[in-house]
């Protein structure tokens, strides 16, 4: 059951766990414990497991060690089957599996585990040999069977030698190596088989191999062995052994010159960090030997891979010149171009590209298999330029591809090329050229989903809703398979669905709500992603003519986005979902919530809900500056709405709840603001001031005992402006708050800041004066509890002094001060404070003197009233004196 499930779950994250379970269980399983399963079933299960691990090579899903464990399990299962009755093929399969399993363990560093499998392979070879000898009929047949057996035997013994060295058993390794040497002499063709492995045991026998009897072993055979010895030395990655490797390969080339020996010599020279001059000499030797073009190109690639550009490029120039008449010269030219581009030698690369295009036009055509390679080089370079946003340069490389196609007209996805060019033009805001490229793409491949995507983008940018909708309808038909096309490219259904999501977002961003709504309808219909469906169903209610949504629709949208928050939160803890896709979804929903909040300016409560949702979704996004600014704004807006609703609350409990919620948002916003300030200069941002005002309002209205300590730090802040202090003053006395002393202090600070400015704004100053005097003289009655009468008189005198020194003081405010001071005088008169009454009324006449056009309206009346007041004051004083004398 574990094996069957493992094979079915091709890329499941539970694969490693299943492999471990199999490996641990196999040690406790024997044939008796699986008696109910027939040999054929066990063998079939083992072979399926082996093929899955080895043939499919599931890539990065399992490691080499896990692959070795799977081979181990499969091999053990096969070996449980009845050997005595096994066929020759079954025994051969067991031998092969034991060899491969043992070698797998050696390769992952577990030679101890490998030894048992090599022993089992040897036993299998003996059994197979017996069977073969029993049915062999002729001497020739026996010789043939022995030869085949010795090849397998050589492999096993060489593997045992490698395992012995890994285990430090050099005596056994030497014994195996001697046995291998004898076999090599008898069967020289086996050298090719062994040359692909790292045969470290040759170190032990290197001198013996070098001294083999030349009468018995020919020069070709000796050269092969010497090359093996040189390769083994090279694998030790040491300077001393590099010299020995070079000596060995020189001997090999002297015995029998072979391309493999020459190439190996180049590898050794590069590994030993030989100087460029010596490398150049070695290259010249190669060229004198008239090696093939492919061999020379491989040497050039080897040089470039080892960052020997000087020698490599020099060799490429010689190759291109020497083989210029060859029909395969295209290989050299393309490799030369690729090398130049990798080293950023773009001007030289472009010269070679021009050479190929001109040569192709004049009849020196590239072979068909090289044409696609040429286009691939150009497109890869264009893609790299596109990635770094160098769209003009990307177009240059695409134009080379287009020019070549104009000559060749084969082996090119022209529609894709035109789409890529259209994308570059769009980024460069060259709409006409983009339109022309898309038109060509449509002509060659009208039913490609990406062709329709670019048709849509251009239509939206041109505000052509009709054409945009037509592209979306075509895309919908592609999804459902309505559009017939022979040999059409089969696309995963997720591709157009993902594209629909991008289309909807692009349409919304460009004000095409009708187009977006249609796209979202299709998205809801075809997407298998619940979040996409949820967003499409609800966001599809957008109407271009609607200023804001109906209440029912808004509730649905809020429900949708709340579910999205929960689903995205779940995705972050889901092993099956990728981080990038989850972040992208969060970004999508965050923007949608933001846009909906902005549209709800007429409904602040709903607006707040969308801002809070946008904030919650933004927390799943990387905390870059853009996200931090968005979070700050969302919380500021939410807090502002909660404070406003708190002012309107009908009950104390409701108000308290709203103020507490606002305070939570303020504190969170303060945290984000502190992080944001570290990312750049935000000196012009009012966030900090707003947070201070919001927090003060909450603390004042909730009668917070820590209000005074909060204000102590606030008064000392250097960056606050007069307007801020005026706002604090208003909030300090806004019900249910009642802190007139705080209001007075704040207004005093505001006036002081106004006076410190080089150019005083008389209008703003006058309003601040009015607020302060209204605070001190509510309803025309001086508040002696808040401030002594002398200080109130001082504020009026300061105002009069200011008015006498400026012409910009609003006349209406001067008139207000005149009336206010007169009314105080009358109030004093009513309280029989005659001296104070006369003083205040006299002050009122001084304000009268500073009126402009309004002075004529009030002068006569005020002077008459003042005369009557003075006369009344004289009588009152006289009467008071008589009464006092009489009393005396």
Image (cartoon, helix red, strand yellow):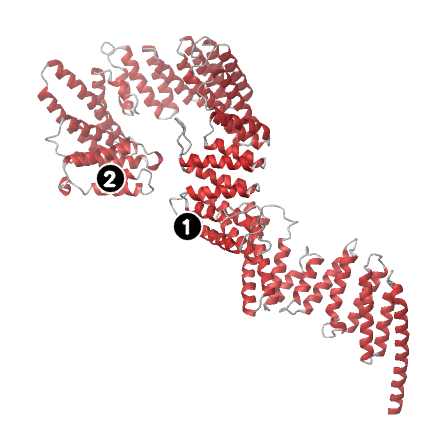
Q: Residue at x 34, y 17 (%)?
A: 248
Q: Residue at x 74, y 66 (%)?
A: 772
Q: Is residue 234 above or below residue 624?
A: above
* Circle 2 or circle 1, nearest the eye: 1
Q: Residue at x 12, y 32 (%)?
A: 83
Q: Position of residue 776 (x, y in %)?
A: 74, 70
Instruction: Give the CA separation, mark 2 to mark 1.
Output: 31 Å
Numbered tag placed on residue 659 in the rendering: none
As helix, strand or loop, the secondary structure at mark 1 comes to helix
- For label 1, count other residues whose C-alpha is less than 10 Å away and answer few (under 14), some (14-19) or many (20+): few
Judge left or right: residue 747 versus residue 402.
right
Quadrant in which the N terminus is drawn: top left
Quadrant in which the C terminus is drawn: bottom right
Judge left or right: residue 49 versus residue 330.
left
- Of 206 and 600, the residue lying toward us: 600
As helix, strand or loop, the secondary structure at mark 2 comes to helix
Tag 2 and tag 1, C-beta contact below 8 Å: no
- Of 158 and 834, the residue lying toward us: 834
Q: Position of residue 638 (x, y in %)?
A: 56, 56
User: Which residue has dot 2 on it?
Assistant: 3
Numbered tag placed on residue 570 in the rendering: 1
């Amino acid at each position: 059951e574990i094996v069957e499930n493992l094979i079915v779950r091709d890329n499941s994250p539970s694969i490693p766990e299943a492999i471990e379970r199999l490996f641990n269980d196999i040690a406790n399983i024997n044939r008796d414990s699986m008696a109910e399963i027939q040999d054929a079933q066990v063998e079939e299960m083992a072979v399926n497991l082996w093929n899955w691990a080895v043939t499919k090579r599931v890539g990065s899903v399992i490691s080499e060690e896990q692959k070795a464990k799977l081979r181990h399990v499969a091999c053990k299962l096969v070996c449980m089957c009845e050997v005595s009755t096994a066929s020759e093929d079954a025994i051969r399969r067991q031998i092969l599996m034991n060899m491969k399993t043992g070698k797998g363990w050696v390769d992952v560093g577990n030679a101890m585990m490998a030894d048992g499998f090599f022993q089992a392979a040897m036993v299998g070879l003996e059994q197979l040999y017996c069977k073969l000898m029993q049915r062999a009929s002729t001497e020739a047949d026996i010789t043939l069977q022995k030869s085949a057996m010795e090849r397998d035997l050589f492999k096993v013994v060489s593997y045992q030698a490698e395992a012995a060295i890994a285990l430090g058993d050099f005596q056994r390794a030497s014994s195996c190596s001697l046995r291998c040497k004898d076999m090599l002499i008898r069967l020289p063709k086996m050298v090719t088989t062994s040359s692909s492995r790292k045969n470290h045991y040759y170190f032990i026998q290197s001198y013996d191999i070098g001294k083999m009897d030349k009468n018995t072993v020919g020069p070709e055979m000796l050269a092969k062995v010497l090359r093996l010895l040189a390769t083994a030395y090279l694998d030790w990655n040491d300077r001393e052994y590099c010299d020995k490797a070079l000596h060995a390969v020189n001997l090999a080339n002297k015995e029998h010159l072979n391309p493999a020996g020459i190439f190996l010599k180049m590898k050794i020279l590069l590994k030993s960090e030989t100087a460029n001059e010596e490398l150049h000499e070695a290259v010249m030797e190669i060229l004198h030997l008239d090696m093939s073009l492919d061999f020379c190109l491989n040497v050039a690639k080897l040089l470039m891979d080892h960052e020997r550009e000087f020698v490599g490029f020099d060799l490429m120039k010689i190759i291109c010149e020497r083989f210029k008449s060859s029909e395969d010269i295209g290989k050299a030219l393309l490799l030369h171009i690729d090398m130049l581009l990798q080293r950023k030698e773009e001007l030289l690369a472009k010269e070679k590209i021009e050479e190929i295009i001109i040569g192709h036009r004049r009849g020196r055509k590239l072979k068909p298999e090289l044409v696609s390679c040429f286009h691939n080089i150009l497109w890869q370079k264009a893609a790299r330029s596109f990635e770094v946003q160098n769209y003009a340069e990307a177009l240059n490389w695409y134009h080379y591809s287009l020019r070549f196609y104009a000559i060749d007209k084969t082996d090119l996805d022209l529609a894709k090329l035109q789409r890529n060019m259209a994308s570059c033009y769009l980024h460069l805001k060259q709409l006409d050229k983009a339109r022309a490229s898309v038109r060509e793409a449509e002509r060659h491949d009208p039913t490609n989903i990406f062709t329709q995507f670019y048709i849509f983008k251009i239509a939206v940018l041109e505000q052509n809703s009709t054409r945009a909708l037509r592209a979306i309808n075509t895309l919908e038909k592609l999804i459902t398979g309505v559009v017939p096309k022979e040999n059409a490219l089969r696309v995963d259904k997720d591709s157009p669905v993902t594209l629909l999501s991008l289309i909807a977002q692009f349409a919304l961003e460009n004000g095409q709500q009708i187009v977006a709504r249609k796209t979202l309808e299709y998205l809801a219909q075809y997407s298998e992603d619940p979040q996409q469906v949820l967003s499409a169903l609800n966001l599809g209610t957008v109407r271009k003519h609607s200023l804001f949504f109906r209440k029912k629709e808004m509730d649905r949208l809020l429900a949708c986005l709340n579910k999205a928050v929960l689903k995205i939160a779940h995705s972050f803890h889901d092993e099956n979902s990728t981080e990038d896709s989850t972040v992208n979804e969060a970004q999508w929903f965050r923007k949608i919530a933001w846009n909906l909040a902005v549209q709800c300016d007429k409904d602040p409560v709903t607006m707040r809900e969308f801002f809070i949702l946008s904030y919650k979704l933004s927390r799943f996004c990387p905390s870059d500056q853009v996200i931090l600014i968005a979070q700050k704004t969302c919380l500021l807006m939410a807090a502002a709405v909660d404070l406003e609703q708190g002012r309107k609350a009908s009950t104390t409990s409701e108000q308290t709840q709203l103020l507490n919620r606002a305070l939570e948002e303020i504190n969170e916003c303060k945290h984000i603001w502190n992080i944001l300030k570290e990312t750049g200069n935000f000196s012009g941002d009012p966030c900090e001031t707003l947070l201070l005002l919001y927090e003060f309002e909450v603390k004042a209205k909730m009668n917070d005992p820590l209000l005074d300590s909060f204000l102590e730090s606030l008064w000392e802040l250097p960056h606050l402006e007069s307007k801020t202090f005026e706002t604090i003053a208003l909030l300090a006395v806004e019900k249910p708050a009642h802190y007139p002393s705080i209001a007075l202090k704040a207004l005093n600070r505001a006036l002081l800041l106004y006076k410190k400015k080089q150019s005083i704004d008389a209008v703003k100053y006058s309003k601040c004066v009015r607020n302060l005097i209204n605070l001190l003289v509510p309803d025309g009655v001086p508040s002696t509890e808040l401030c002594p009468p002398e200080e109130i008189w001082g504020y009026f005198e300061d105002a009069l002094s200011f008015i006498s020194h400026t012409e910009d003081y609003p006349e209406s405010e001067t008139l207000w001060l005149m009336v206010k001071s007169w009314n105080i005088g009358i109030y004093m008169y009513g309280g029989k404070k005659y001296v104070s009454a006369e003083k205040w009324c006299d002050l009122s006449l001084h304000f009268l003197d500073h009126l402009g056009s309004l002075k004529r309206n009030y002068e006569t009346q005020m002077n008459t009233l003042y005369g009557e007041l003075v006369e009344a004051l004289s009588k009152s004083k006289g009467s008071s004196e008589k009464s006092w004398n009489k009393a005396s």
